[in-house]
Image (cartoon, helix red, strand yellow):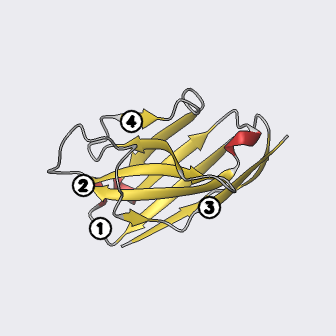
Amino acid sequence: VQLVESGGGLVQTGGSLRLSCAASGLTFSYYDMGWFRQAPGKEREFVAAIRWSGRNTYYADSVKGRFTISRDNAKSTVYLQMNSLKPEDTAVYYCGADLGAGYQANRDLAALDYRYWGQGTQVTVSS
């Protein structure tokens, strides 16, 4: 299984970026997907998640209304559209995948111990 993030970079405050996470080696449509981030000196934190069915999405309070998670099962890719970026959004962003089909429909994707992780992509927001 491989998860490859892309789309990070340097952007000014108020700008936008779209992160992608391309998955291979798994049946993507059966997997819950999450985005997390880790800033220097801080623990990794939940950003957003989407269930394998695509019916439900979840966001950290800090990004609600600014970030949107989506998935394209035909491309085995999950996206994170980030708008109105702030300097505090600066971090390495990681995507995680965990088999969702057949599991509890309401398990907490923010607290889930994801089975697979990507290598991360750096997002830097300048003030």
Q: Residue at x 49, y 45 (%)?
A: 46
Q: Nearer the viewer, mark 3 or mark 1?
A: 3
- According to the image, label 3 marks what residue? 121
Q: Earlier in the sequence, mark 4 or mark 3?
A: 4
Q: Sequence order check: which comes first, mark 3 or mark 1?
A: 1
Of residues 14 and 90, the one drawn nearer to the viewer in this rendering: 90
User: Alpha-carbon distance for marks 2 and 1?
Assistant: 9 Å
Query: Which residue does the numbered mark 1 point to in the structure image?
Result: 26
- Considering the image in quadrants, where does the C terminus appear? top right
10 Å crowding of disc 2: few (<14), some (14-19), many (20+): some
Judging from the image, what secondary structure is the residue with disc 2 in?
A: helix
When the figure is inspected, residue 14 is found, relative to residue 115, above or below; the finding is above
Residue 43 image point, x, y percent: 57, 53
What is the spatial separation of the Cα atoms under label 2 and label 3, in whole angstroms?
24 Å
Q: Pointer 2: what residue?
A: 30
The N terminus lies in quadrant: bottom left
Q: CA distance from mark 4 to mark 2?
A: 15 Å
Amino acid beneath label 3: Thr
Which of the numbered marks, if any, corresponds to residue 72? none
* Kind of residue at badge 4: Thr
